[in-house]
Amino acid sequence: MPDDSTGATMVQVHVLGVALDSEGRHIILLKPVGEAQAVGLVLPIVVGEQEATSTLIALSGETPPRPLSHDLMKTLLDTLGAHVERVDVTRIDQETFYAEITLGVAAGPLVLDARPSDSVALALRVEAPIFVADDVLEAEGIPAAMVESARNVEETPDGEQSLDEFKDFLEHVDPEDFKG
């Protein structure tokens, strides 16, 4: 599907999951909607630990004890009468992915530059569709069979373990830990 603003061909994706790559970095895995398991490509996007945890919470349907940044974004949009129409991962430049959030506001569509990690976490909360530029998926995607075989090897899903670790973090965090 071509995107009206850029002319690029966009592919609708869903969040397959959150995992750790071979270097221990958190990654969000995006897979085209409608493709069978182990078929096609999966787009891995490196994200921070907090964004990965926020995405895992949204995927699980859990509610954190206090609103996270993405929950606050959703509340702000709801309060202002705006909604997320879509999220687009538009390009990659020097190993950095770029995304846009298209908001529906009274004055018409409003496109915001955003990080993919924040965009995906917000899209999951508001159930907005996520798209990836076809050329980005082709250039940076990995075979889905690799992801599926790695998932079958794991004894405990990363999502459950990371969510439990995050809950433990929230219960024991001290504001003094964040002073610079």
Image (spheres, rainbow, N blue to C red):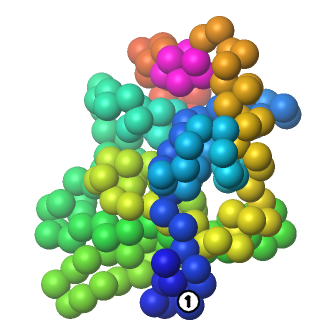
Q: Residue at x 49, y 90 (%)?
A: 5
* Residue 25 x %, y %: 75, 37
Q: Residue at x 65, y 9 (%)?
A: 155
In the rendered view, would you say 34 is above or below 66?
Answer: below
Would residue 103 appear left or right of 90 to someone viewing this image? left
Nearest the viewer among 71 and 9 is 9
Magenta segment main secondary structure: helix
What kind of element bears circle 1?
Answer: loop
Would residue 78 appear left or right of 85 to someone viewing this image? left
In the rendered view, would you say 171 is above or below 134?
Answer: above
Identify residue for label 1. 6
* Residue 119 x %, y %: 47, 59
> For residue 83, which quarter of the picture?
bottom left
Residue type at numbered disc 1: Thr
Residue 141 visible to the viewer: yes
Q: Residue at x 46, y 38 (%)?
A: 54
In the rendered view, would you say 3 is above or below 98?
Answer: below
How crowded is the residue under tag 1: few (<14 C-alpha within 10 Å), some, or many (20+)? few
Is residue 61 a member of the stretch shown in magenta? no
For the record, the magenta segment spans 157-163
> For residue 39, which quarter of the picture?
top right
* Residue 56 x %, y %: 47, 33
Nearest the viewer among 126 and 43 is 43
Q: Residue at x 31, y 70 (%)?
A: 85
